[in-house]
Every structure is written in structure tokens, then in C-alpha cells.
Image: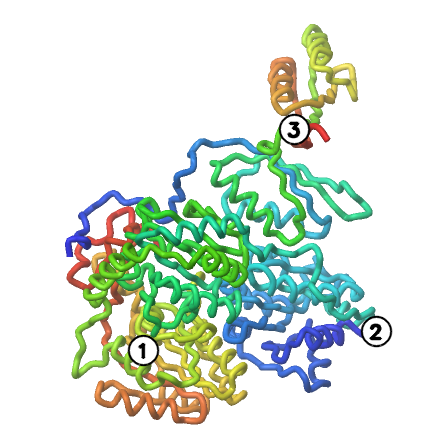
């Protein structure tokens, strides 16, 4: 169906046709025609943010918790440049976003006009693809292509830059075409010979391990179901990256916990000692591998990934499989069943006996205190008191993020939103609002550090305005905890600028924003305070004063392999050599 | 805790050191990339090379199908086999990229480059320049009493050799197009 309409109306029409119900945005001169169209309709809900970075993180939270693309609308110049951090974050973590930016009118492009920026130039390396639309007639097709590119293949953020005259001018609107544009059709089915080779390797492996990542979650709920079926049917242990938590349930019997720099002892040693490593939708990130030449030295490696460039990027694999995780797992299960559901039972039982030995180390144990709240204890209580609830967790970045990954259990996919690849402090608060907008009745908790939280705290205004009852669970150690930990380990305990001075009174801050503030410093008061936070019908800023010098363990120091983990402060003396010190 | 006994000052490798089982030998490859001829497509390709630290030895681009809006980019690059594979995979990810061909591994191919060389001089040097140009089948496209502009087509090696010979004879300026390449046969 084609219709004549203005570019601005086309934008709103295309969003409706793509099934968009929510847009996160901030108006400005170059998007006024689109805002005028938004004003004249009721189908699309617009969330007015306080800063464009917040809009993008909200859209990320919305996207990751729903599986649908997040949509952002911001103005030209500073509106677009403020979105850059969020775009980069979404690119690193493969989050589908469609970001619309206003631009100065076409005849002013290149004149250094007011609020002009080379938006497509600036965002080219931090988007999956971007477009500058110079003709209204091309706008509808571009908008539809944008949704297709953002959501198919390896998901990612896309951006459309729309000059103001294109928004005003009238053109022909075209409805979306099924199947998206021809020119971008990534391969989703894996090669059956490669999948058969993987099944054959799995049947005989003595010490196999599944290493799963965000790709399982991006592939959709069915992929998580298939993973669970495969893991439980084969009895093979499974570990996951930070991004993949929840794909296999934390209560599952084959669950080893998260792996990597702050991963669990048993997970990392299983990676180091395995003879078959099956990477499902993860990317051998440097937080995972540690020292490359000592990474899982005796294993055959298989890698399932929808992005061919992920394969052999850092780790050379023996069985590469390009395809969508869900499709590949389905074929893998079929082939494994058809071949007689074989596993190396004897090898597996020895392997599990070894893993059980490693589990006895109890790597997440810590010294609790009667007088001070340990951050680990706070998270254990949060976990205990919210277990079984319809719960979504977001985090900021730092020690609290790692503790949240270690001490909270995720039973389902799409319940855990965190900035993994880019490590964006200030992600969690806006992301929690995005999640809550998509799930108005759920409990949404942002596990935060006070320093990260301050980076986008203006978004509390958004939370209050749109009545999103997000709970800001701030583990306040008055430090940039992870920076402080590295300075302790690497820089002779010279704590250069890693403390939070002149912190606001978070309870008064909550009052100023018009929401509820809670402060707790005694472990005895913690449970009651958490319950009060959960029960309060509205946003809460929870100031949890915790031990100031707690370090996050286990830890694989920079430049070390998986089997050289630090389990506690006693292990840290001279742990990082000169070469490790240059790493981040 | 013997497994955790970390040797002090152990000489560990960087986690960013992408050394692998692949050969470490540096190879030279010629890639042909067919793209939609749209705004910014060359910037995407070049940005990929600069952003990920790959080398570009030579790059040529021109529209090859006006009706279909297709352009062909020919890139000469160097790197380890693993890097070359990464470059191809990364190029393949770019939305307006339709085909990536590694002409170096996909069978025999022809490579040609065109160069213009300005040689100034007089007397015996001028005669010698003309004589060598004849041997290299370079043609004179501009001539004054004190200078020639030669046009030469061939492989980059041939152009290098010709330029080396012209240098003592008064080479003042050179412009090269970069390599265009096609696979041999049908």
C-alpha cells in the first residue's frame, strides 16, 4: 500500500507498522516535525528522558528484556553525539536498536549550521549500519530496512539521520515488505557436516564443557529451551559468560556458574581442563580467555556463532559453525538423537567427580561481619528475598556488577541486563527504566555502585515522571571499587582518585526527585529495608553502606591463564607481573 | 592450592596478543569487494581497516555497473593468514558489501596498475628515458622540450622497476592508480 504523507508522519507510520509501542527520546529543533506527529497520536508511547545517553540505555534495557528492538528519537548535533556511548554499548553487546536522529536541512549540511554534526560519520564505527536519508521518497524503505538490519543476523544498533526538510516534505509511504531487504540476509542454518562433526566429538569426549554466551539469549527463548534440553540430556557441564546468564538456569544441576576474570573456580578450571570446548554464541572475549596461549590448552574447540567474523578472531577453533544458535542447537539435538544419544558416560562421571572437587573450594565464600554490611551479603539477601518473584536485574559497572553476576541466580533469559563489552558506567539506572516500561508489573532492581549510579542519576526524574517503580540498590562503598582493587593489586596501594568524595545524601536526593530513599548500614536492618524497598509502590533509591575495602574474588589477574586464579586477598601478593599490568 | 601458586614475575603474554596456531608469516593478498555504490560505502571500508589496525597497500574504487549501482573496490593488503581471514569476514559484515573475493587464493588472477611519470631533462638522459620507455611499452602522453609524461600499465612490480630506472634520468613526479585485478579464465 502506498500513500502520500510528510516525512515526519512516515516516521511515526513506519514505527507503528514495525510494531513499536515505545520510543525513548528527547526533542530538539531538528526533530520538531516528528514530535509534532507523536503529539497527534496515541499508539506510540514516548518516554521523555533527561539525557540522550539515558534514552539509548533505556532502549537497550527494553530490547534486552523483551527481545524486540529498542527505539530512540533524538535531535541533531548534541542529541546525536550524546547517543554515541549508548550506540557503542549496544554494538559491543549485540543489542538491536533503531536510533533516529534529526539533522539540519539538506541544503545546510556541510555549512557548520547550528546543531549540525556529521552524525553518520561519527556513528559509522559504533553502529551496525547507518543511513543519511536525503529524499522523503526513500525514507519509508530506509526505516523498514533499518529494523531488518538491527534485528537479523547478529543484532546491533542502527541509526537513521533525517534532515529537517525531509521531515517536512511530502513523499510516498511504502509499507514494510516481508522478509526484509534482499541485500542483507545472514545465514541462520549451520552446516550439517560441521554439526555432525561436533556431535561425534561430543559423543566421545571425556571432559566436555558448554561455554555459552549472549548469542543464546539473542537467538530467542526457544534457543534457551534447546540449550537446556541438550545440556540436561547429555549431562555435560555448562558455564556462561556475563552476557549469557539465564540461558541455562542457575538452579540447573549442570550449572557451573559464570566463567572468566571474576568467574567461578569450578567454571574456569573446567574450561582449562576440558578436552572438548563447545562455544555457543560467545566470542572468546579477553575477559573470558585470560592469557591466550594458555587458554584451554588441551581441548578440541567448537564455535557456534551467527557472525563469521567472530570465528577464529582470537582463538582458533577446530569445528566452526556459522549459524543462529537456535537453528544449530535444533539440528544438533536431532542428529545426536538420531545417532543414538551417545555420551562417554565413564569419562563424564570422572569429569563430574573432578568438578565436584573443585566446587568444594567454595570460591564464593567470604568473611562476613556482624557490624558492617558486606556487599556479597547484601546481594545474597537480595537474592533470598526476591527469589521466585517476577524479577529483572540491571547493573552498573564495577565490583557490584561482578558480585551481582556471582551471587544472584538467573533462572530465565532476558532477566539480566548489564553492560558487558563496553563496560559503561551509568548504564544500569536508565536500563532499569527501559525494562520497567516494558514490564510494568515486574520487580526491576538496578544493582549499582554509587559512583556508576551518579553518572546518569538525572534519569530518576524520568523514573518518577513515568511512574516506573525501579529499585536502585546502591552498594555504597564510597569508592570506585574496581579501580581501587586494581590500584591495590597493581599500583602499590596508591589510590589515585578512586574515592567518591562529596557524595550526595541519597535519601535527601530521593526526596528531591520525589521518590523514596532508604539508607541502611547495619546488617541487622538489611532484610527489613530490602522488604520495604520491594513493597514500596514507586521508585526507590536504596543507599546500602557496605564495607569500603572489599575485593572481588575469584579473580584471574591480567595476563594469567584460567588455572592461576586468585581466591582471596592472601593470594594477591605480586600476582600481576609487569606485562599483565599493561592490560585493562 | 598448588594450582594457584603464581610464579612471581612470570613472563606472561598479553591477552591482546593475538598469536595463534596460524602461521605468523606476513602474506600479501589482493581482495576484490563488490559494493552498493552509495554514499559512505568507501568510508565504511577504509574505516574498518583503520579502526581494526589492518594495512592498506593499495586501494582502487570505481563504479562498474551504473544501472545496478555497483562499485568494485580492489584492496591490496598484508597480514598474517589469520588477519587476512578476519579482514575478509569483517568486510563481509558491512551491509552494502555484496561479495568479497580473495584473488590471491581463489586461483590465478591478473593485476594491473596504471602510472603517469613526469621526467624532466635534456641531452642524453632524455634520449635514454625515451629508449627505456620503449622497452617498457610506456607511451608518451605529454611532451615539452624539457620534459615527458609517460603512461605505463602493468603489474606494480613493473611500474616500480620503470620508476627506479627513471629516477636518475630526471623523474620529478609520479601518479599511480593502484591495482585493479580480475581472476583469470571464465
Compared with residue A380, is residue A531 higher up or lower down, i.e. above or below?
A: below
Residue A419 coordinates in the image, percent (x, y): 44, 67
Q: Which residue is mark 3?
A: B109
Residue B45 in the figure: left or right of residue A409: right
- Give the label on residue A475, or none: 1
Quarter of the figure with the N terminus of chain B: bottom left
Badge nearest the viewer, 2 or 1: 2
Residue A574 coordinates in the image, percent (x, y): 19, 53
Q: Which secondary structure, mark 1?
A: strand
Task: Mark 3 and mark 1 in contact? Answer it, CB < 8 Å.
Answer: no
Seen at 20% across and 46% down, the residue is: B9
Q: Which secondary structure, mark 3?
A: strand
Compared with residue A580, is residue A20 higher up or lower down, i.e. above or below?
A: below
Quarter of the figure with the C terminus of chain B: top right
> In front: A99, or B68?
B68
Residue at mark 1: chain: A
Residue A432 coordinates in the image, percent (x, y): 46, 78
Q: Which residue is mark 2?
A: A3
Q: Which secondary structure, mark 2?
A: strand
The part of the image, by quadrant, that contains residue A425 is bottom left
> In front: A8, or A332?
A332
Residue A41 in the figure: left or right of residue A443: right
> In front: B178, or A63?
A63
Whole-angstrom CA distance, mark 3 to mark 1, is 63 Å
Q: Answer yes or no: is residue B122 visible.
A: no
Residue at mark 3: chain: B
Residue A381 coordinates in the image, percent (x, y): 28, 83
The part of the image, by quadrant, that contains residue A350 is bottom left
Label whose residue precedes the other's in the sequence (2 or 1)? 2
Compared with residue A75, is residue A486 higher up or lower down, i.e. above or below?
A: above
Seen at 31% across and 88% down, the residue is: A519
Amino acid at each position: 500500500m502506498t500513500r502520500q504523507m510528510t516525512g515526519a508522519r512516515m516516521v511515526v507510520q513506519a514505527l507503528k507498522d514495525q510494531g513499536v509501542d515505545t520510543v525513548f527520546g528527547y526533542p530538539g529543533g531538528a526533530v520538531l516535525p516528528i514530535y509534532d506527529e507523536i503529539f497527534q497520536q496515541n499508539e506510540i508511547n514516548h518516554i521523555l528522558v533527561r539525557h540522550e545517553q539515558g534514552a539509548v540505555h533505556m532502549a537497550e534495557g527494553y530490547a534486552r528484556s523483551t527481545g524486540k528492538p529498542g527505539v530512540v528519537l533524538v535531535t541533531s548535533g548534541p542529541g546525536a553525539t550524546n547517543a554515541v556511548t549508548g550506540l557503542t554499548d549496544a554494538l559491543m553487546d549485540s543489542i538491536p536498536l533503531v536510533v533516529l536522529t534529526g539533522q539540519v536541512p539538506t541544503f545546510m549540511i556541510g555549512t557548520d549550521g547550528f546543531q549540525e554534526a556529521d552524525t553518520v560519520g561519527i556513528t559509522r564505527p559504533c553502529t551496525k549500519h547507518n543511513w543519511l536519508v536525503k529524499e522523503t521518497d526513500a525514507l519509508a524503505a530506509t526505516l523498514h530496512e533499518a529494523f531488518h538490519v538491527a534485528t537479523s543476523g547478529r543484532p546491533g544498533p542502527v541509526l537513521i539521520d533525517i534532515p529537517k526538510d525531509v521531515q517536512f516534505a511530502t513523499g510516498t509511504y511504502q509499507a514494510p515488505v516481508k522478509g526484509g531487504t534482499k541485500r542483507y540476509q545472514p545465514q541462520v542454518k549451520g552446516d550439517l557436516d560441521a554439526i555432525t562433526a561436533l556431535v561425534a566429538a561430543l559423543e566421545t569426549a571425556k571432559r566436555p564443557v558448554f561455554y555459552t554466551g549472549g548469542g543464546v539469549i539473542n537467538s530467542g527463548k526457544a534457543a534457551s529451551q534447546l540449550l537446556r534440553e541438550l545440556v540436561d540430556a547429555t549431562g555435560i557441564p555448562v558455564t556462561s559468560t556475563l552476557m549469557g546468564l539465564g540461558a541455562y538456569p542457575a538452579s540447573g544441576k549442570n550449572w557451573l556458574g559464570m566463567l572468566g576474570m571474576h568467574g567461578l573456580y569450578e567454571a574456569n578450571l573446567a574450561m582449562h581442563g576440558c578436552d572438548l570446548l563447545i562455544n555457543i554464541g560467545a566470542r572468546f572475549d579477553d575477559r573470558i580467555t585470560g592469557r591466550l596461549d594458555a587458554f584451554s590448552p588441551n581441548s578440541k574447540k567448537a564455535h557456534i556463532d551467527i557472525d563469521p567474523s567472530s570465528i577464529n578472531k582470537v582463538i582458533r577453533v577446530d569445528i566452526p559453525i556459522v549459524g543462529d544458535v537456535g537453528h544449530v542447537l535444533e539440528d544438533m539435538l536431532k542428529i545426536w538423537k538420531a545417532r543414538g544419544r551417545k555420551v562417554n558416560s565413564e569419562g563424564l562421571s570422572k569429569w563430574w567427580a573432578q568438578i565436584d572437587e573443585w566446587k568444594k573450594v567454595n570460591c564464593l565464600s567470604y568473611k562476613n561481619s556482624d557490624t558492617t554490611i558486606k556487599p556479597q551479603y547484601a546481594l545474597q539477601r537480595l537474592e533470598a528475598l526476591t527469589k521466585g518473584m517476577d524479577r529483572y536485574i540491571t547493573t552498573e559497572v564495577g565490583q557490584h556488577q561482578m558480585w551481582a553476576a556471582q551471587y544472584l541466580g538467573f533462572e530465565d533469559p532476558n532477566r539480566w541486563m548489564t553492560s558487558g563489552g563496553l563496560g559503561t558506567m551509568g548504564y544500569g539506572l536508565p536500563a532499569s527504566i527501559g525494562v520497567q516500561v516494558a514490564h510494568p508489573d515486574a520487580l526491576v532492581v538496578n544493582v549499582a555502585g554509587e559512583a556508576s549510579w551518579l553518572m546518569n542519576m538525572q534519569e530518576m526524574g524520568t523514573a518518577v515522571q513515568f511512574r516506573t517503580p525501579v529499585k536502585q540498590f546502591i552498594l555504597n562503598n564510597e569508592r570506585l571499587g574496581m579501580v581501587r582493587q586494581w590500584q591495590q593489586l597493581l599500583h602499590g596501594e596508591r589510590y589515585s582518585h578512586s574515592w567518591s568524595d562529596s557524595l550526595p545524601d541519597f535519601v535527601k536526593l530521593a526526596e528531591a526527585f520525589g521518590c523514596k530513599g532508604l539508607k541502611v548500614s547495619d546488617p541487622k536492618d538489611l532484610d527489613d529495608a530490602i522488604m520495604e524497598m520491594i513493597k514500596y509502590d514507586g521508585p526507590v533509591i536504596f543507599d546500602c553502606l557496605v564495607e569500603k575495602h572489599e575485593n572481588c574474588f575469584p579473580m584471574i589477574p591480567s595476563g594469567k591463564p584460567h588455572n592461576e586464579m586468585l581466591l582471596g586477598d592472601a593470594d594477591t601478593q605480586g600476582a600481576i607481573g609487569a606485562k599483565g599490568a599493561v592490560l585493562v | 592450592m598448588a594450582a594457584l601458586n603464581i610464579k612471581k614475575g612470570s613472563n606472561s603474554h598479553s591477552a591482546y596478543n593475538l598469536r595463534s596456531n596460524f602461521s605468523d608469516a606476513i602474506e600479501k593478498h589482493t581482495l576484490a569487494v563488490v559494493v552498493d555504490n552509495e554514499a559512505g560505502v568507501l568510508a565504511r571500508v577504509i574505516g574498518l581497516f583503520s579502526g581494526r589496525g589492518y594495512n592498506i597497500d593499495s586501494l582502487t574504487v570505481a563504479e562498474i555497473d551504473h544501472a545496478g549501482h555497483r562499485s568494485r573496490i580492489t584492496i591490496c593488503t598484508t597480514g598474517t593468514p589469520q588477519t587476512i581471514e578476519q579482514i575478509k569476514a569483517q568486510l563481509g559484515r558491512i551491509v552494502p558489501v555484496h561479495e568479497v573475493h580473495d584473488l590471491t587464493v581463489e586461483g590465478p588472477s591478473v593485476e594491473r596498475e596504471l602510472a603517469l611519470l613526469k621526467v624532466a631533462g635534456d641531452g642524453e638522459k632524455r634520449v635514454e628515458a625515451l629508449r627505456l620507455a620503449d622497452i617498457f611499452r610506456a607511451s608518451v602522453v605529454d611532451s615539452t622540450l624539457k620534459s615527458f609524461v609517460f603512461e605505463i600499465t602493468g603489474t606494480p612490480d613493473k611500474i616500480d622497476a620503470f620508476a627506479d630506472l627513471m629516477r636518475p634520468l630526471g623523474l620529478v613526479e609520479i601518479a599511480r592508480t593502484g591495482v585493479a585485478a580480475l581472476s583469470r579464465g571464465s
